[in-house]
Image: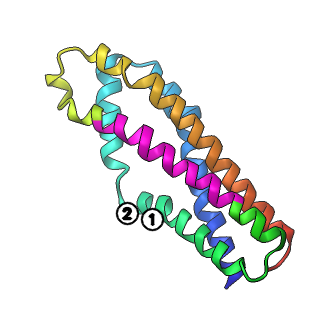
Amino acid sequence: MRTLSLAAATVATGLMAGLFFAYACSVVPGLAAVDDRTFVGTMQSINRRILNGWFVAAFLGAVLLIGLAVALHVTVGGRVLAWTVAALVSYGATLLITMRCNVPLNDRLDAAGPVDRIADLRVLRDGFEVTWARWNLARTVTTVVAFACLVAALATGRS
């Protein structure tokens, strides 16, 4: 059960690291090249549609599975436990960044209403784009670190 929980945590965390990385190196630069109307409308659409069962299962499942892996390794201790705890701390930072930084920005963008009714798209975009991208990069780093810690835990040996 310990190995299975660790492997599942690694897969879920890897999925999230890949998602945030894909945003950082494709979605963000791609949207940087479009006009304000397209940017705002597209980000509003993405932010609404990402809240689906697959995303929620991976996003929250990762932390739950890492927590389970930690709990199951407490009695055996050692390097596997240390790497798994480090992953939990790093993924916890991902959750904190997402909930305290990216989500409020998403909510503010959504609250502006339909793109056709927004008086000044440039002002809205300027208050969102750079800050959101910076925090997305930060959570990309914390999630990749969590993933690397879990890979190290798996590589440390069978638990």
Q: Quadrant of residue 71?
A: bottom right
Q: Is residue 32 above or below residue 13?
A: above
Seen at 36% across and 34% down, the residue is 105
Tell me if label 1 and label 2 are in contact, CB under 8 Å. yes
Circle 1 crowding by C-alpha within 10 Å: few under 14, some 14–19, many from 20:
few
The colour scheme of the drawn protein is: rainbow
Dot 2: element: helix
Quickly name the residue at label 2: 53
- State which quarter of the image contains the C terminus: bottom right
* Percent coordinates x, y for residue 131 in the rendering: 46, 26
Quickly name the residue at label 1: 57
Circle 2 crowding by C-alpha within 10 Å: few under 14, some 14–19, many from 20:
few
Distance, label 1 to label 2, CA atoms, is 6 Å
What amino acid does circle 2 point to?
Gly
Q: Is residue 43 left or right of residue 65?
A: left
What amino acid does circle 1 point to?
Ala
* Percent coordinates x, y for residue 21 in the rendering: 59, 41
* Percent coordinates x, y for residue 129 in the rendering: 42, 24
Q: Is residue 75 left or right of residue 34?
A: right
Seen at 68% across and 72% down, the residue is 6
Seen at 18% across and 21% down, the residue is 118
Seen at 29% across and 32% down, the residue is 109
- State which quarter of the image contains the N terminus: bottom right
What secondary structure is the stretch in magenta mostly built from? helix
Q: Which residues are magenta?
A: 86-107
Q: Is residue 98 magenta?
A: yes
